[in-house]
Image (cartoon, coloured by chain):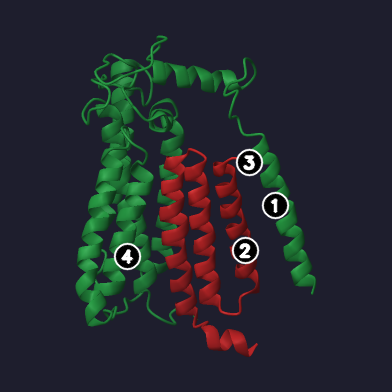
Chain colours: A green, B red
Amino acid sequence: MNKIAAIFLIGLISAGALGVYISNLPGKKPFKRNGHNDISRAYMTKTANGGKRNVIKKGDRKLENSSSNIVTAVVLDYRGFDTLGEVTVLFAAIAGIGLLLGGSRRRRIRPAGPVISSMAPWIAAFIIITSAYIFLHGHLSPGGGFPGGAMIAAGFLIMVLGMGSRAPKIFKTIETFGGLAFITVGVIGFLKKGSFLQNAFGSGEVGTLFGSIFLGILYAIIGFKVAAELSSGFGEFVAEEEGKHE
Amino acid sequence: MSAVNILILIITLVMLAGAAAVVTMKSMIGAAIMEGIVSLMAALLFLKMGAPDVAITQAVIGAGLSTALFVMALNRAGIDEKEASDE
């Protein structure tokens, strides 16, 4: 009975909090004139209007980073250093998993039944193609390197569970060189423009795939790195020898 | 109340019901799958509120990978429905 009462109380509190949150969503007055929202407004108008008062449209050039997706512009360009920190945290977590589970003997993964094991490569292929689209179009449409890489890992997990395939050694190499490439792009920005992770490749036409080559390169690096990390981490989990740690 | 708000309300109620089911459910695998449903509803909520980037990440990681991780861990630990209902 106590459990039911606790659940009811928690539900009541969260429903109330959500109601307050929804009623305070900025629907009609998007920006306050002063206070901490000034910084976000500056970033929004900078990217969305290209520093001028006109809304960007296809064909605009010479903007700060030529991204049609404001989230990508903030995550990779204005806050690129935070993204480097996130990538590092993920690398540390996967390195810990590899340290704990990597040395053990490997279990042979039994493939699933004939229906699943024959369909698994097809499903995985479509998932991986979709995720490549998601991280290559990160600066044009919603998405980007992190969800794209996680989707590749999900496709790989289907292959592991369905067909009994294993994480190849090259995943570790991609992981290492991905981090290195991210920092190299940052250092190129430092050498050419004077600030770490600054956009050193210029900006082309808005709305084209190669218009914003800096964000494209960074998201491709992050996509490959996250995919390799999560895939090898899940590979370690699945292939861990049973009863080893007891 | 506009149509969007009613949709948000429905999604929220499903999330609450799913969260209650996670706690009360006897089967551990079922609880893991209900947790995935809560994540999926959260992704819908993000999409409805105009944050498609977050919605994609939530759907992939919350509903996909973490549910798979829970199910794999429960399988490995040998906790299945029978043992859980014996307690």
- Structural crowding at the residue carrying mark 3, measured as other residues with C-alpha within 10 Å and reported as few (<14), some (14–19) or many (≥20): few
C-alpha span from label 3 to label 2? 22 Å
Estimate the spatial distance between the alpha carbons at disc 4 and disc 2, rounded to whole Å.
Answer: 29 Å
Nearer the camera: disc 3 or disc 4: 3
Residue B1: image tag: 3
Q: Chain of mark 2?
A: B
- Separation (CA) of disc 1 from disc 2: 12 Å
Q: Quadrant of residue A186?
A: top left
At label 4, counting other C-alpha atoms closer than 10 Å, the crowd grade (few under 14, some 14-19, many 20 or more) is many
Q: Can you give x and y, in whole percent of width and height, for residue A91 in the image?
A: 40, 50
Q: Is residue A177 left or right of residue A245?
A: left
Q: CA distance from mark 1 to mark 3?
A: 20 Å
Q: Quadrant of residue B2?
A: top right
Of the residues shown, which amino acid type is indicated by label 3? Met
Please name the residue shown 46% across and 59% down the image: B63
CB-based contact (under 8 Å), mark 3 and mark 4 = no
Circle 4 SS class: helix
Nearer mark to the viewer, of 1 and 3: 3
Image spot of residue A245 (x, y percent): 47, 77
Task: Write the residue at 29% across / 78% down.
Answer: A109
- In the picture, the quarter occupied by the N terminus of chain A is bottom right
- Residue identified by numbered label 2: B17
Q: Earlier in the sequence, mark 1 or mark 4?
A: 1
Q: CA distance from mark 1 to mark 4?
A: 34 Å
**B43 or A173: which is nearer to us?**
B43
Circle 4 is placed at which residue position? A157
Q: Given the image, what chain letter belongs to the residue carrying mark 4?
A: A
Indicate the position of residue A234 as horizontal and vertical percent values.
37, 64
Q: Are marks 4 and 2 in contact (CB under 8 Å)?
A: no
Residue corresponding to mark 1: A14
